Structure formats: C-alpha cells, structure tokens
Amino acid sequence: MNYLDQYILDFSGLEDGTHHFEYAVGMELFREYDFREINDCNMLVHIEMNKQPDMLELKFAFSGYVLCECDRCLEEYKQPLSGNERLLVKFGDKTDEPDDNIMIVPVQEHQINLSQFIYESIVLMLPVRKVHPEDKNGKSDCNPEVIKKLKELNHQKKNNDPRWDELKKITLKN
C-alpha cells in the first residue's frame, strides 16, 4: 500500500450533509514529497465535510507542531502551527482548477486524495524566518554561545575598511 493512500477520502457511500474526519500527520508525509526543511512533524487535521449533490465543501483545522532548525543558531526547536483552510471539490468535466482552493473532479469520481492539499497547507503555515521563540522575559531561547559569537562577528563587521570611506562619500547625482 502506498503511504499517501491513507489520505484518500471516500465519499461515495455517504449521505448529503455534514461528516467529520481526522488525520494524524507525521514526518512520513514530508518524506513522500521530499521536503527537508523540517525534522519531525506531529499534526492533527480535523476535516468537516459538507456533502452536497454537486460539490463537497471541506473545512480543515490544523493543529500541532513541527521540529525545525533555527535560522539564527541552527539548533532544533519546536514550532507550533495551527490554522484553517477551505477546499471546494466540484464535480464536472473540466479539469482546470480556477483557484488553489477549488478542485474539480469527474462526476463519476467517488474519492479524492487529500495528501497534497494537507502537505501544501502545512508548508505554507511555516514562518518564513524560523527562529526560537522568546521566553516570558522576551529573551531568545537560542543557544547563548552562538548568539555571543554572532554579536562578535557583527562587531567585527562594523569596523570598516578605511579604503572604502572615500567611496562612501560619493553620491549619485540625478
């Protein structure tokens, strides 16, 4: 069995109305998509599906965390993630998808694989800059030795090369 098959939602035998589903997401999903920016994942995805004769409305609620490397000190930390997404699954003959949150499937289809939508949603929840959160006193939880070394390097960088001083005085005239 393919790992991603566990994310198949079979809606064929369900009556119209609201239905609930839950998926546990671990690191295996990210390995399947060869995503290497996180080291571990423990997410829960709750889906509320409103089945209608001509479409499915899926509301996703994500909660959990991922382990990733801090961009500042390169040590691993736990990044909490939570969010909500919405996906409309319409039945029709067209295969083009006018929006990222609209999926069009053939009328005769009886199941959909949600793995890519779940994967992409979690990846988009990741912060652009991944750094340790601050403690209750507003101090970073980064490795203090690395922070000390970064400050030293930053101080050294500020000691400019005097050869560039004259060039800095030159301004562009319009």
Image (cartoon, rainbow, N blue to C red):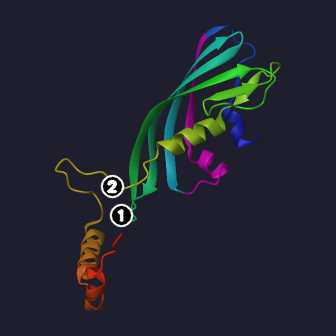
Question: Dots 2 and 1: beta carbons under 8 Å?
Answer: yes
Residue 6 pos. (x, y %): 68, 34
Left/right placement of residue 84 relative to residue 141 reads right
Q: Secondary structure at mark 1?
A: loop
Q: Earlier in the sequence, mark 2 or mark 1?
A: 1
The quarter of the picture where the C terminus appears is bottom left
Residue 146 pos. (x, y %): 30, 71
Callout 1 amino acid = Arg
Q: Tell me: residue 115, above or below residue 145.
A: above
Residues rendered magenta in the picture: 18-36
Q: Tell me: residue 136, above or below residue 43.
A: below
Q: Secondary structure at mark 2?
A: loop
Q: Which residue is mark 1?
A: 72
Residue 136 pos. (x, y %): 19, 47
Residue 17 pos. (x, y %): 62, 8
Q: Which residue is mark 2?
A: 132
Q: Viewer-proximal residue, 162 or 35?
A: 162
Membership of 12 in magenta stretch: no
Label count reads 2
Residue at position x 30%, y 76% in the image: 171
Residue at position x 40%, y 61% in the image: 71
For the residue carrying disc 1, how many other residues have a C-alpha within 10 Å: few (<14), some (14-19), or many (20+)? some
Membership of 26 in magenta stretch: yes
Picture quarter containing residue 148?
A: bottom left
For the residue carrying disc 2, how many other residues have a C-alpha within 10 Å: few (<14), some (14-19), or many (20+)? many
Left/right placement of residue 63 relative to residue 121 reads left
Instruction: Specify the label residue 59 is tagged with.
Output: none
**Inter-mark Cα distance, 2 to 1:** 8 Å
Picture quarter containing residue 116?
A: top right
Left/right placement of residue 158 relative to residue 72 reads left
